[in-house]
Image (tube, grey):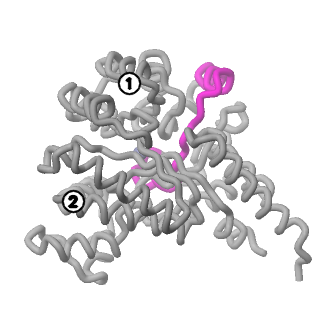
């Protein structure tokens, strides 16, 4: 079996992947057909062109056009269920923490209760139909400031579902100081939610320090610029703070110039726990499988090393203990089959 095939068949957990950002051309086509006035093509060929990004500004434009197609609770349900199907069938995902931004849906006219009902309905159906366990992270769209933070906290605390495990912070980092969100993160953490902000994707290590010190981050989304600060790397390693690394996304958004410049290896060399993730896979023309292959290349990993990366994601997840044990067992079985199967 090639490393490619090994990765394709490897059972996995993913920790950093966005809800709307996971809408594939197939899913967007279905939503676009429901809302023909939205200006998004519904034929697959037109969508392939639509999804070919010229630059980062164009990516944001396409992302928002897709956000705009999610107009009813039924759209939310379809999006979530179909994303789960592709995760399970295409990427062998057994567990995913999907980052949702309920604030943008509420702004577009879907009240929080029907929104929550729709994602929960899809979650239960996905577990039943695809064997994929889903959990939610609600993130604050940071560029919308304190009103967005207050609303997101309210959705998390007053309209809570048992499947909500984390509280995040996304959107652009430049001009969005982390300190302003401190109190919201304190309240979310006091209610038992895990702190998982994005940091150090497009700004320096000081944003990661702030996220650790002020927001109580347990995992950091991206964290690219940690590589510039040995003291920070030592702190992350020593306190078990995990990096959610998204290699292909980092090149697509120019957080890293070229994949061969990606700091993944310096994280591992410093003893920091890393997990591999796909962020907004169809929008960055990637898949989780592809990102595992990229990571294997950057770290010179064989099958055992790749299996260790997959186990690290399970360990760093907020999945129930029995789910963790089951997926880890499946990863070990997959590796054992590979190591003990006679190679032609
Ligand atoms: Zn992200």
Disc 1, SS: helix
Instruction: Give the distance between the C-alpha atoms of the residues marked 1 and 2, in whole angstroms.
Output: 27 Å
Q: Which mark is residue 70?
A: 2
User: Is residue 77 part of the magenta span, yes or no?
Assistant: no
Residue 300 visible in the displayed image: no
State whether residue 272 is above or below residue 54. Answer: above
Residue that carries the numbered disc 1 in the rendered image = 188
Pick the quarter of the image with the N terminus: bottom right
Q: Residue at x 52, y 46 (%)?
A: 15
Q: Residue at x 34, y 53 (%)?
A: 119
Q: Quadrant of residue 161?
A: top left
Disc 2, SS: loop
Say if disc 2 is inside 8 Å of ligand 1.
no
Pick the quarter of the image with the C terminus: bottom right
Q: Residue at x 28, y 76 (%)?
A: 47
Relative placement, left or right, of 248 versus 94 is: left
What type of secondary structure mainly makes up the magenta span? helix
Quadrant field for ligand 1: top left
**Camera-side residue of 120 and 75:** 120
State whether residue 173 is above or below residue 97. Answer: above
Residue 189 point in image, percent of width and height: 43, 22
Range of magenta residues:
230-255
């Amino acid at each position: 079996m090639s490393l490619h095939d090994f990765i394709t068949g490897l059972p996995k957990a993913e920790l950093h992947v966005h809800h709307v950002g996971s809408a594939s051309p197939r899913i967007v086509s279905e939503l676009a057909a429901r809302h023909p006035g939205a200006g998004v093509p519904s034929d697959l060929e037109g969508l392939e062109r639509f999804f070919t990004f010229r630059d980062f500004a164009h990516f944001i434009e396409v992302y928002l056009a897709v956000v705009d197609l999610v107009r009813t609770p039924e759209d939310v349900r379809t999006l979530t269920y179909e994303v789960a199907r592709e995760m399970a069938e295409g990427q062998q995902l057994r567990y995913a923490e999907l980052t949702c931004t309920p604030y943008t849906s509420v702004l577009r006219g879907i009240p929080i209760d029907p929104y929550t009902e729709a994602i929960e309905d899809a979650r239960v159906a996905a577990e039943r139909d695809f064997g994929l366990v889903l959990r939610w992270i609600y993130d604050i769209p940071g560029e919308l400031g304190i009103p967005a933070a207050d609303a997101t906290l309210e959705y998390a605390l007053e309209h809570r579902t048992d499947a909500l495990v984390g509280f995040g912070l996304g959107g652009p980092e430049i001009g969005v100081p982390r300190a302003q969100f401190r109190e919201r993160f304190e309240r979310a953490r006091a209610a038992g939610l895990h702190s998982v902000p994005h940091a150090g994707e497009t700004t320096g290590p000081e944003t990661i320090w702030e996220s650790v010190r002020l927001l109580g981050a347990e995992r950091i989304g991206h964290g690219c610029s940690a590589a510039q600060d040995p003291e920070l790397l030592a702190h992350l390693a020593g306190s078990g703070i995990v990096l959610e690394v998204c290699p292909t996304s980092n090149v697509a958004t120019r957080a890293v110039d070229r994949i061969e410049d990606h700091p993944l290896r310096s994280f591992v060399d410093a003893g920091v726990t890393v997990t591999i993730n796909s962020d907004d896979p169809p929008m960055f023309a990637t898949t989780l499988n592809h990102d595992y292959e990229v990571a294997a290349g950057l770290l010179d990993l064989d099958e055992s090393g790749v299996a260790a990366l997959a186990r690290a994601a399970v360990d760093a997840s907020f999945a129930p203990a029995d789910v963790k044990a089951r997926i880890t067992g499946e990863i070990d079985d997959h590796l054992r089959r590979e190591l003990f199967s006679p190679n032609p």
